[in-house]
Image (cartoon, grey):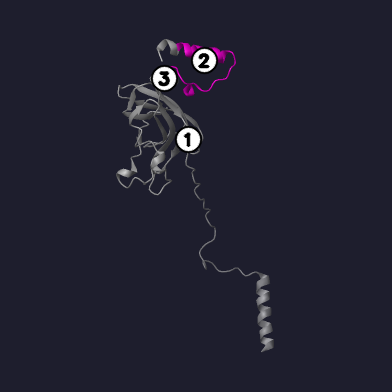
Amino acid sequence: MKIRESEELREHWRGLEASGIPLEPLEFRSGGEGRGSPNGLLIRQEIDVGSQVIMELAGGRAGYILKCFIRRDLPGNTTITDFWLELPWPDAHIDWLPDPAQEESIFAPYTFTRGGWPYPRTDVLNHRLKGVLARGQVRNGLLLGVGWTRPPKMYPHGTKIMATLHIIDQWDRTHSAPFEMYLHRLRKLKKPTYTKSTRGPLLSRRDIITQDKATYRLNQNHEKKEVA
């Protein structure tokens, strides 16, 4: 489609929307340069159970789970050479989890910890996001990373945190998209409290025999003598 035709099509869409006619989201419409992406690479957050989460891990670390949809819209190819996640606090360096097939097998799942919750390798983008995308090709799945510092304490459990996924292509152009993530803090266990006992060691002091106890014992001894 020529540039002028693309501009006319977008103007036509705006006119339809202004008149109250509902249209599908921009990224799903046919025509128009980039279909919502000026450089032809659509990046979209995918909402799913257990995705879009920042979770505290043991050892002062944090795990990052994103689910994204990436598509090349323009003619030609886009080669993804690198990608990273930007967070709203400094020194938030994130390492993407390595491909488990490098050390185990192609059937080994991704995990944040040894023996932890498994993520099937076919569902994860870490090892297959980089590479060539031709027009209409898609990358869809999870991105799993580990940060070596936890989010600052100013962000409580359940906070919505805006992160930005950046993708670099073969021309060193940056393609970016916002991701709304939820912070999951580890539950802190309460330390048990102990009260100091006022009792001393066993047999540490003699029993105090009251008058009633003394009378009872005398009666018992008297009864025994009568029986004998």
**Does the CB distance between marks 3 and 1 fall below 8 Å?**
no
First in sequence: mark 3 vs mark 1? 3
Distance CA(mark 1)–CA(mark 2): 38 Å
Q: Determine whether the residue tagged by mark 2 lies in a helix, strand or loop.
A: helix
Q: Determine whether the residue tagged by mark 3 lies in a helix, strand or loop.
A: helix
Compared with residue 117, is residue 79 higher up or lower down, i.e. above or below? above
First in sequence: mark 2 vs mark 3? 2
Which residue corresponds to the image point at 66% horizontal and 84% vertical from the top-left?
224
Q: In which quarter of the image is residue 225?
A: bottom right
Asked if residue 162 shows in the view, the reply is no
Tell me if residue 219 is in the magenta stretch.
no
Identify the magenta region. 7-32
Which residue corresponds to the image point at 68% horizontal and 71% vertical from the top-left?
212
Q: Determine whether the residue tagged by mark 1 lies in a helix, strand or loop.
A: strand
Give the residue pinned by disc 2. Answer: 13
Asked if residue 166 shows in the view, the reply is yes
Give the residue pinned by disc 3. Answer: 34
Q: In which quarter of the image is residue 7?
A: top left
